């Protein structure tokens, strides 16, 4: 819903749903290669020519495939409907486990909106997350005077053409994606705490492990994608651009020289990612530093909500965190985006 408002394509039809999927953090373009067909405003289809999530879990067996393609997907699509039209139904034509094993496309779905459909049920967790600072944080409006597109109010395109948008629009998109990564973590944390019960230490340990894996892998991809320098300078720059510290209005931090200074932030009020980093919990920052250079070392001094991290270069290389190694099991860790031409999609 936030992305619809940001790029001015709010609506109640299939086209709105498909635009939202193109910008959904759960469906990174090309890695999750959605192809869309629009029959009319209320009827459409999509299939995945390439599903990176499926290819990640298939080697682990059918139970993992069903967990991904059934247990996770079904409520996810219900949530997608909530953002656009509560009478939307996303139903499989076919989906994994694949029969035969090399079946393509990987899956296919119909999307139908009909007044006779029952409304999607209320999701209690949505109400909880919807009250967080992350959900309600306002971001700078897109500057419509800059060259390039400022919104996605025009026709649905086969692929979202990032290069066609203005600098201001891309900054807003990047900030929205980072903010929604925090929202995704907060939703994850609700589920973990529910299962951990009174074992607060277990819940925090699980949450920290996922952050360490994400921190190191995202740091490595950012460093390579932007061709940033190595050493201390490169590590501080990667941290400044990292989702852990963005958007800047949600995570209040200063970057310069060899250090990062974190201040009490809206993210701390939510118990979002920054709350998992402290003088006693350096691993997430150390994972980012390792992604730039394994010889870098991070020290943090201060309190749980206000601290300064200092990065230094040492003679001894550290080992990659096991959490990062596990995250690299995903094909997404090395996935390379390719340039594509974007064509308007019209009803067929």
Image: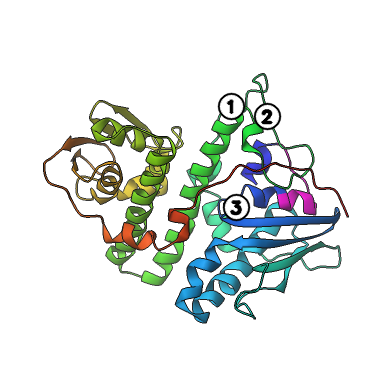
**Of the numbered discs in the image, which one, if any, rests on residue 30?**
3
Dot 1, crowdedness within 10 Å: few (<14), some or many (≥20)?
many
- The percent coordinates of residue 141 (x first, y second) are 61, 28
The quarter holding residue 90 reads: bottom right
Above or below, 195 against 313 in this view is below
Mark 2 or mark 3: name the one nearer the start of the chain: 3
> Which residue is nearer to you in this view: 264 or 160?
160
In the image, what residue occupies the spot 40% across and 37% down? 251
Residue sitting at x 61%, y 42%: 339
Identify the residue at image location x=69%, y=41%.
341
The first of marks 1 and 3 along the sequence is 3
Q: For residue 73, what is the image quadrant? A: bottom right
Q: Is disc 1 placed on a helix, strand or loop?
A: helix
Tell me the residue at 25%/42% (across/down).
293
Give the colour scheme shown: rainbow
Left of 1 or right of it: where is 314?
Answer: left
CA distance for labels 1 and 3: 24 Å
Span highlighted in magenta in the image: 8-18
Which one is nearer the viewer's eye here, 157 or 114? Answer: 157
Which quarter of the figure is the C terminus placed in?
bottom right
Point out the frontmost of discs 2 and 3: 3
Q: Is residue 51 above or below residue 101?
A: above
x, y percent for residue 296: 20, 41
Identify the residue under disc 2.
Answer: 150
Q: Earlier in the sequence, mark 1 or mark 2?
A: 2
Residue labelled with disc 1: 168
Tags 1 and 2 in contact by the CB under 8 Å rule?
Answer: yes
Give the left or right position of residue 159, taking residue 218 as reference: right
């Amino acid at each position: 819903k936030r992305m619809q408002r940001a790029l001015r394509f709010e609506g109640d039809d299939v086209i709105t749903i498909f635009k939202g999927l193109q910008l959904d953090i759960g469906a990174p373009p090309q890695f999750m290669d959605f192809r869309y067909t629009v029959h009319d405003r209320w009827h459409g289809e999509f299939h995945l020519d390439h599903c990176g999530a499926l290819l990640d879990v298939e080697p682990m067996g059918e139970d993992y495939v069903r967990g991904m393609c059934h247990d996770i997907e079904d409520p996810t699509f219900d949530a997608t409907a909530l953002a656009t039209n509560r009478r939307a139904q996303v139903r499989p034509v076919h989906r994994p486990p694949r029969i035969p094993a090399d079946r393509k496309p990987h899956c296919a779905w119909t999307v139908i909106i009909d007044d006779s459909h029952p409304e999607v049920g209320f999701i209690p967790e949505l109400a909880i997350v919807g009250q967080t600072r992350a959900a309600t944080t306002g971001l700078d409006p897109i500057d419509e005077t800059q060259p390039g597109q400022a919104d996605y109010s025009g026709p649905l395109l086969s692929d979202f053409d990032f290069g066609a948008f203005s600098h201001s629009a891309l900054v807003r998109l990047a900030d929205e994606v980072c903010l929604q990564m925090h929202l995704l973590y907060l939703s994850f944390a609700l589920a973990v705490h529910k299962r951990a019960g009174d074992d607060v230490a277990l819940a925090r340990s699980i949450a920290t492990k996922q952050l360490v894996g994400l921190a190191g892998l995202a740091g490595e991809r950012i460093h390579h994608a932007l061709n940033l320098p190595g050493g201390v300078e490169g590590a501080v720059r990667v941290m400044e651009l990292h989702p852990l510290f963005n958007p800047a209005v949600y995570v209040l931090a200063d970057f310069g020289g060899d250090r990062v200074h974190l201040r009490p932030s809206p993210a701390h009020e939510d118990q979002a990612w920054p709350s998992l980093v402290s003088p006693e919990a350096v691993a997430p920052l150390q994972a980012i530093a390792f992604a730039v250079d394994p010889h870098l070392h991070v020290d943090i001094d201060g309190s749980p909500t206000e601290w300064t991290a200092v990065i230094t270069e040492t003679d001894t290389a550290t080992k990659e965190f096991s959490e990062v190694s596990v995250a690299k099991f995903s094909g997404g860790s090395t996935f390379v985006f390719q340039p594509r031409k974007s064509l308007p999609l019209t009803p067929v």
